[in-house]
Amino acid sequence: MSPGRQQARTVEEHAAAVLARVAPLPADDVALAALAVAEPGRVLGADVRAVAHVPPFDGAAMDGYAVRLADLPPGGATVTLPVVGDARPGSPAGDRQEGEGAGGAVRIMTGAPVPAWADSVVPVERTSTERFVAGAPTTEGEVTLARQQRTHVRHRGEDVRPGDLLARAGDEVTPALVAVAASAGLGSLPVRRRPRVAVLSTGSELVPAGDDPGAGRIPDSNSLLLAGLVRAAGADVERVGAVPDDADGLRRALDLAVGAPAGDAAGRADLVVTTGGVSAGASDVVRAVLAAPDARLRDVELAAVALRPGRPQALARWQGVPWVALPGSPVSAFVSFALFVRPALAVLASRAPARPVRRRVASAWPSPPGRVHVVPVRTLPSGEVERAVSPAGAGLRAGGPRPAVGGHAASALLGADALALVPADAEKVEAGDEVDVLPLGGAT
Ligand SMILES: Nc1nc2c(c(=O)[nH]1)N[C@H]1C(S)=C(S)[C@@H](COP(=O)(O)OP(=O)(O)OC[C@H]3O[C@@H](n4cnc5c(N)ncnc54)[C@H](O)[C@@H]3O)O[C@H]1N2
Ligand code: MOO
């Protein structure tokens, strides 16, 4: 289609068009220590299998004496055995001759290898010694003990064996997986690179947050919003900030945003997300850049999506990097991120995307038909949802009892934990209706 014409689309069609532009990133081996300390939430690029036995040897599960069951009388009668040695954690069981000490008792601490001839550990509190004194030399020459019900030996490989599946491709790396992988002989895991996302907002009215805006200007909130949402979705963010409505300025900012020159994958963005400038205005700079031929620009799609808020959308590639252009109104940008960008980040990272769930509505709200109406909601303790308002109720001021609606009324997001997706043909939402709700997973 010609880049000047908007294509009418459903939400699903536009989401599919975004996903068609991204693919899972490659996986690299990353050291377990780095995953534990600095890289939470990475996703596996391949199945993970154990390479070693856990436990790696037969070891004591109790502090006590390692003995041979055959040397203890059945029926609970006691026997006195000579103490023939010590086995401490970290000392190899193999440093004694095979069979050396057999018929005696070896003082053994939890985690130490059990001598090859022994098959049972009697806890110290069940013996004549009663207790070991930490740090003190152990000198007793003999010990009186009896056969126990349990052997208190952890057997080699009883938990994990080489080749056992520990986690599947697509699973998130958790602290427990890092720990179990370490025990099972691995030093690293194959994880997908985190997506790198460049975000920038467009608009000559924008000033950096905290600056005095002056007449007719407003603080740039979208580049902060997008940066935070990208981070919350587990990707790395490069925030370029706000760019005025000047086509050449936007082209330069896009060059900066995509990063290193084509061909140098390291440091290059995987996705560029912009806000603003996609509707029909004379100063809509994204539209202007998308309409003019440029060797850096490819695969332009302008879409009018049946979505409220968030109708005007655009897609392209800049220097080969997928570019998702969202509308500028803050709630429109938020909703568009949840519906179109977050799923793309899930594909890049090889994660399962967030799926809508069905929720009952606690109290009615109006819903203009014609487009999918996305409503910030909060979940009540009962599991029902109600329309979100800001903590101060500020959104309620505009039209009496009804919250202010539309792409500009962002304060309702402060009270939201999910987005209700009301179908395009619904004229109202009544208490007791069930609606699809997309959980925000803490990312608002
Ligand atoms: N004639 C038409 N006008 C508009 C249409 C249309 O179809 N025909 N669509 C409307 C809809 S729907 C939306 S949504 C907006 C989206 O327009 P743009 O993407 O071009 O966004 P802007 O015009 O740049 O900004 C819209 C609004 O949001 C404020 N804004 C923009 N960027 C930021 C930012 N970084 N931080 C805070 N606020 C921002 C901006 O000042 C405007 O108030 O177009 C409608 N118009
Ligand atoms: O669709 Mo606009 O995104 O109404 O606010």
Image (tube, rainbow, N blue to C red):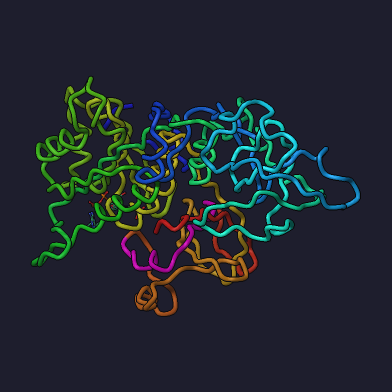
Closer-to-camera residue (302/29): 29
Q: Quadrant of residue 412?
A: bottom left
Residue 225, x across and y down, in percent:
30, 55
Q: Residue at x 65, y 37 (%)?
A: 114
- Whether residue 15 is visible, yes or no, is no
**Where are the magenta residues, as a range?**
408-424
- The residue furthest right is 75
- Which quadrant does the N terminus fall into? top left
Q: Is residue 423 magenta?
A: yes
Residue 116, x across and y down, in percent:
68, 31
97 lies above or below 373: above
Residue 259, x across and y down, in percent:
19, 33
- Whether residue 113 is visible, yes or no, is yes
Residue 343, x across and y down, in percent:
44, 41
159 lies above or below 61: above
Q: Residue at x 44, y 58 (%)?
A: 442
- Which quadrant does the C terminus fall into? bottom left
Q: Residue at x 62, y 45 (%)?
A: 108
Q: Is residue 308 magenta?
A: no
Closer-to-camera residue (5/246): 246
Q: Residue at x 71, y 44 (%)?
A: 82
Left or right relative to 192: residue 162:
right
Left or right relative to 164: residue 91:
left
